[in-house]
Amino acid sequence: MASLVSSWSSDLKCLPDNYVLPEGKRPGMPVPVSNDIPVIDLGDGLDYSRADMVQQIAKAGQDFGLFQVINHGVSKELMADAMNVSKEFFGMSTEEKAQYYIDSVALEEKAGCRLYTSSGYFLAQGFDFWKDTLQHPCHPLQNHINSWPDKPKNYREVMGPYTTQVRKVAMKIMDMIYQGLGLEADDTEKEFDNYNLAFSINHYPACPDPALALGCCRHSDPAILTLLQQEVYGLQLEKDGHWIGVKPLPDAFVVNIGLLLEVISNGKLKGAVHRAVTNSACSRNSLVTFVGCPTDVTIKPAAALISPTNPPLYRAFNNKDFHEFVFANNAEFEAVIAYLKLKT
Ligand code: OGA
Ligand code: NI
């Protein structure tokens, strides 16, 4: 258990060598937050129509691959409770967390609930990331909730409704994304039921040298859509070859397009390339809900988006094979993109 960053990092003055990234991968100078990233109001009774909302989402998905949503329907109280429970979880003693911990060797085999450190890829890549993660599946809730932590004592009581409601927001957004792409709502709705949901709590302890370490590597999520809640800054988006900071907005979800949706949309929507930096002042938790496809389905560009003038840019692949590839390649962005794209 010595390996969870949160179990040994407090009061540390110097960054251990295995967290010092190779030169090209370091975050370097701080990146300011950007006011350009779209913030989309999903509230009822707005002075613009659903069609406008669909357009805003489509444009944000194309231009940024990432946007924030407000008035999404998850209550402020539930969001605050979820953030607090996540802090209580990581605030527990090392001994209490030990029962959930799994080392990087066993990580690949273990589905279900797991607590791990770094990216879980250390053996292959030779360096570590400054983060601990608790992750578990969520949908359908009754199939999974009993595998979730039972400490803190209200963990399941809070995270059950939280993940269920975040899923509803995700489905609403997906519906509008599919509409924006011109794909049939009827067909997709049936499939939405099969979409799975994974929930992660990322915990980034205060870091003695944020310029040399990263909390989370440069990557694009191997999912359909990701919804993230944060209160401390740390998430950055790569846009036109530069990093820009995603501003923590109270009560907002950061929504980012995942690689599966990039493929399904045949590149109309961009999977957001992002990373998480650390800071020396305080720890940071992010609550991340990933909407994914069932493991054994074939993912490919939607037939309705393909024509002689719009040939497929991505190949058809099995989702399970894809996830195995991502894991085997340390989520290396270039390798993952090369796996998905058809050679032109
Ligand atoms: C992730 C991720 C960013 C963050 O978990 O996939 O990108 O800010 N997290 O925690
Ligand atoms: Ni991510």
Image (cartoon, helix red, strand yellow):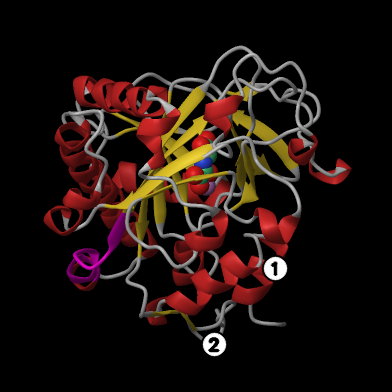
Q: Is mark 1 on a helix, strand or loop?
A: helix
Does 230 sit left or right of 36 as displayed?
left
Which quadrant of the rendered structure holds the C terminus?
bottom right
**165 or 121: nearer the eye?**
121
**107 or 296: nearer the eye?**
107
Image coordinates for residue 204, horizontal then vertical, percent:
55, 29
Q: Which residue extends farthest right?
A: 23
Displayed quadrant of residue 40: top left
Residue type at mark 1 is Ala
Q: What element carries label 2?
A: loop
Q: How far apart are marks 2 and 1 (CA)?
A: 28 Å
Q: Mark 1 points at which residue?
A: 335
Residue at the (64%, 13%) spot, across then down: 11
Q: Mark 2 points at which residue?
A: 308
Residue 131 lies, with reference to residue 217, above or below; the image says above
Q: Give neighbour class at mark 2: few <14, some 14-19, many 20+ (Cα, 10 Å).
A: few
Image coordinates for residue 23, horizontal then vertical, percent:
87, 41
Asked whether residue 285 is in view, the answer is: yes
Does 313 sit left or right of 112 as displayed?
right
Residue 152 lies, with reference to residue 307, above or below; the image says above
In front: label 2 or label 1: 1
Residue 215 lies, with reference to residue 100, above or below; the image says above
Residues at marks 2 and 1 touching, judged by CB atoms closer than 8 Å:
no
The segment highlighted magenta reads 188-197
Residue at the (46%, 38%) spot, across then down: 67
